[in-house]
């Protein structure tokens, strides 16, 4: 009985340690791989082509969306993200992810945000209206729903308007 208890306790400790390591390390690995695959420097907008079955940089890509992405680093500078949401007939969103691949802020055109947006992203976040990031590095993802060729043309325009620029840190 005593050996059974020790074995069960050892097994439980191994399971918890493995789970903790998986949760702590895997998001960092996913983020590092995605950042490396982008082939762009940090704080640079990546305009993705229309998603199809051949696009394998995204696991199980959704062909109904057009994407812009930006892997950011706000350790030395803040970022100013500007662009336009589509009108209410076409869903669009702006999502902010930390380096743990978890979203911490999402805004979209159906939640009452103004069509034109200008968002300051900071690691110190001492100004009003500034989004404070939980990590110094992360990703921004702009998505636009596309259901026909007219919406695709509109999405391409929104992609070209989406900009990211460096600002002095507001400390």
Image (cartoon, grey):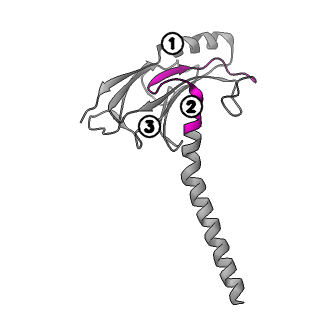
Question: Can see residue 100?
Answer: yes
Secondary structure found at label 2: helix
| Residue occupied by mark 1 | 160
The alpha-carbon separation of the residues under discs 1 and 3 comes to 23 Å
Which dot marks residue 36? Answer: 2
Residue 141: x percent and y percent?
Answer: 53, 29
Question: Can see residue 116?
Answer: no
Residue at image coords 35%, 38%: 123
Check residue 48 for magenta coloring: yes
Few, some or many residues within 10 Å of mark 2 (<14, 14–19, 20+): few
Secondary structure found at label 1: helix
Which dot marks residue 137? Answer: 3
Q: In the displayed image of the protein, which residue is found farthest to the left?
A: 171
The alpha-carbon separation of the residues under discs 1 and 2 comes to 23 Å
Q: Is residue 72 above or below residue 163?
A: below
Few, some or many residues within 10 Å of mark 1 (<14, 14–19, 20+): few
Q: Earlier in the sequence, mark 3 or mark 2?
A: 2
Magenta stretch, residue numbers = 32-53
Give the label, 3 or 2, closer to the camera: 2
Q: Nearer the viewer, residue 136 or 82?
A: 136
Q: Nearer the viewer, residue 99 or 85?
A: 99
Give the label, 1 or 2, closer to the camera: 2
């Amino acid at each position: 009985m005593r050996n059974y208890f020790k074995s069960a306790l050892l097994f439980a400790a191994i399971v918890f340690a493995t789970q903790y390591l998986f949760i702590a390390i895997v998001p960092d690995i996913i983020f590092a791989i995605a950042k490396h695959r982008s082939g762009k420097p940090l704080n640079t907008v990546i305009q993705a082509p229309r998603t199809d079955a051949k696009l394998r940089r995204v696991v199980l890509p959704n062909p109904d969306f057009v994407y812009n992405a930006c892997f950011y680093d706000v350790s030395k500078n803040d970022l100013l993200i500007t662009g336009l949401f589509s009108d209410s007939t076409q869903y669009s969103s702006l999502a902010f992810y930390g380096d743990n691949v978890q979203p911490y802020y999402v805004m979209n055109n159906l939640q009452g945000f103004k069509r034109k947006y200008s968002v300051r992203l900071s690691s110190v976040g001492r100004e009003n209206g500034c989004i404070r990031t939980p990590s110094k590095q992360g990703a921004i993802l702009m998505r636009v729903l596309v259901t026909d060729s007219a919406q695709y043309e509109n999405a391409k325009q929104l992609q070209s308007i989406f900009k990211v620029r460096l600002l002095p840190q507001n400390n």
